[in-house]
Image: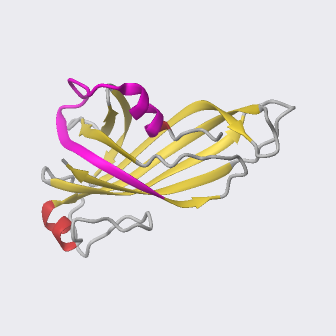
Amino acid sequence: MRPSPILLALALAAGCPAESVPGDVVVGTFDFATELLQDNCDVVNQQDPGSFSATVSYDSKTSEAYLTVGATSIAGVLAGDRLSITASANRTLWRPSSDAGCPGAIVERVEGRLIDEGEAHVLGLKCSTDGGLYVPDGGSADARPDVRLICGSISDVLSAQQDPSCTVDPCLVTYSLSGVRQ
């Protein structure tokens, strides 16, 4: 079985919602959905993260942003209206031709654009399903307090750790990401 993406694992492990989130500005809590775009991995049963809820917040004095799933927060960067979160974890990677797993690692990168209420209505309150970031003509580069959508992608890079008995080529799995504010 392939590793579950980190956000899915956090959502399943977290259980209860966070009472507080890091940072001094809460953008909002979003219901996220994903759709598989690309999978060039030769390990089996990659699980689509499907849907999850998360709170986005940031520190107004720095560019540090946070994605909080349940009681766990992952730090990243908010640059204008662009959100970037990277996390990594060790996982067991499974090949179709083997009953034994290989020690592996997953690096997950979430890229998204915060879209305000006006732009969200132009988009019909839906993100593109190609994983691209919607870029309006002449849009502001500042994060806005009335964020309605977060559109972007999740990319998972899977690789084997140093184990001579296990050979798994590094590979990429990409999902579109669409988050609607609750």
**Residue 176 in the figure: left or right of residue 120:** right
Q: Left or right of 157: which side holds 15?
A: left
Say how many tags the image has.
0
**Of residues 130 and 16, which is closer to you in this image?**
16
Q: Please say whether residue 34 is one of the residues in the magenta stretch.
A: yes
> Where is residue 19 shown, x and y percent of the image?
21, 23
Q: Nearer the viewer, residue 141 or 10?
A: 10
Q: Residue at x 26, y 38 (%)?
A: 55
Front position in the image: 109 or 77: 109
Where's residue 121, x and y in %?
16, 69
Image location (x, y in percent) of residue 92: 67, 32
Residue 15: quarter of image:
top left
| Up-down relation of residue 73 to residue 168 (above or below) | above
Q: Is residue 174 left or right of residue 117?
A: right
Asked if residue 180 is among those painted magenta in the image, a careful observer would answer no
Q: Hey, which quadrant is residue 148 in on the image?
A: bottom left
What residue do we see at 69% from left, 37% from top? 93
Q: How is the image coloured?
A: secondary structure
Horizontal side of residue 19 vs 153, given as left or right: left
Span of residues in magenta: 7-35
Query: Residue at 81% of width from left, 30% of height from top?
Result: 163
> Residue 112 at what x, y percent from top left?
36, 54
